[in-house]
Amino acid sequence: MFNNPRTSTRYSKSLILLLILLLVGTWYVRERNRYEQEGYLLASSLEADLVYQCQTAARTYGLDWSLLVSFYLQTRRKATTEEIMNQAAVIKESASEIQFFEKIFDEHELKLMLHHARQIKRFGYYFSPQYVFPVQSKQLTYKNTWGADRDSGKRKHQGTDIFAKQSTPILSITAGRIEKLGWNQLGGKRVGIRDIHGNYLYYAHLSDYRNDLSKGDSVLSGEIIGYMGDTGNAEGTPDHLHLGIMTHEGQWINPYQFLLYWNKYSKKSGAD
């Protein structure tokens, strides 16, 4: 193809460089996706009460709440609110947070704790009182049924069901844009909202939507988007909202601990 040896060599080097860049790019995307999947799974598994108590103690003493949560994960200690507050005071008295943890953990343990703290800080943003519990009722029930069998084991439950009376208002958890509005076989009448993080919030089995909503509309945190029902494959079951959260990478995560947090600690809780 090339008569000039120098041109041929230059072409070969360029091709090799391009292949190296493609391999590095593929590796980077794969590792980034793996890191995000691990981070979201870790964040969604945290206990809501532990997170809130660590956040409160961290604010009181000017600490990083994600480090405090990661500390309790690493030590696997159960602690009361008072104990967490006292522990935060002890950490504050140290020269630095890292120096305190270096006295407790070996090098491997410290590296793991800091890794988890970074993931919690980056992916634990749903643990915030700015989000709203999605069902506007004091008379409601819900429990953690993540991964339970559905359709005789053909699929797994990928969300949380919140039970309340028919036509109870359903609220948008956060600000976002309506991406899907309409009927599907499983969810019946459902609303799908893309939030500011790029995640997809799925509200299913509604009896109806708010009649002035359209696909593409922007919604605010706490805005009514529909009403409790039993449509889709939930027909004939007790009225409930199926809430699902899918990350922008297409991974469903368990919303249960987030819901506990919003229900107990959100300033604009829909359950109030």
Image (tube, rainbow, N blue to C red):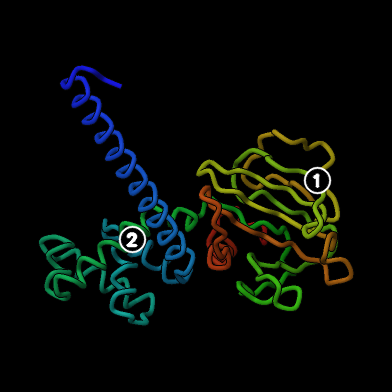
- Which residue sits at x=43%, y=57%? 124
Quarter-of-image position of residue 150: bottom right
> Residue type at mark 2?
Ser
Q: Which mark is residue 110?
A: none
Q: Looking at the figure, which quarter contains the C terminus?
A: bottom right
* Residue 59 percent location from the top left of the image: 33, 57
**Of the pair 18 and 176, the residue shown nearer to us:** 18
- Which residue sits at x=30%, y=44%? 24
> Residue type at mark 1?
Gly
Q: Secondary structure at mark 2?
A: helix
Question: Eyeballing the image, is 227 above or below 23?
Answer: below
Outermost residue, right direction?
Answer: 236
Quick one: label 1 or label 2, which is nearer the N terminus? 2
Judging by the rendered image, the residue that carries numbered circle 2 is 66
- Which residue sits at x=64%, y=59%? 244
**Of the pair 239 and 154, the residue shown nearer to us:** 154
- Check disc 1: other Cα within 10 Å, few if <14, some if 14-19, many if 20+: some
Outermost residue, top direction?
Answer: 4
CA gap, disc 1 to disc 2? 39 Å
Q: Which mark is residue 182?
A: 1
193 left or right, relative to 247: right
- Which residue sits at x=37%, y=45%? 26
**Of the pair 37 and 78, the residue shown nearer to us:** 37
Number of numbered callouts drawn: 2
Question: Eyeballing the image, is 124 above or below 257?
Answer: above
Quarter-of-image position of residue 239: bottom right
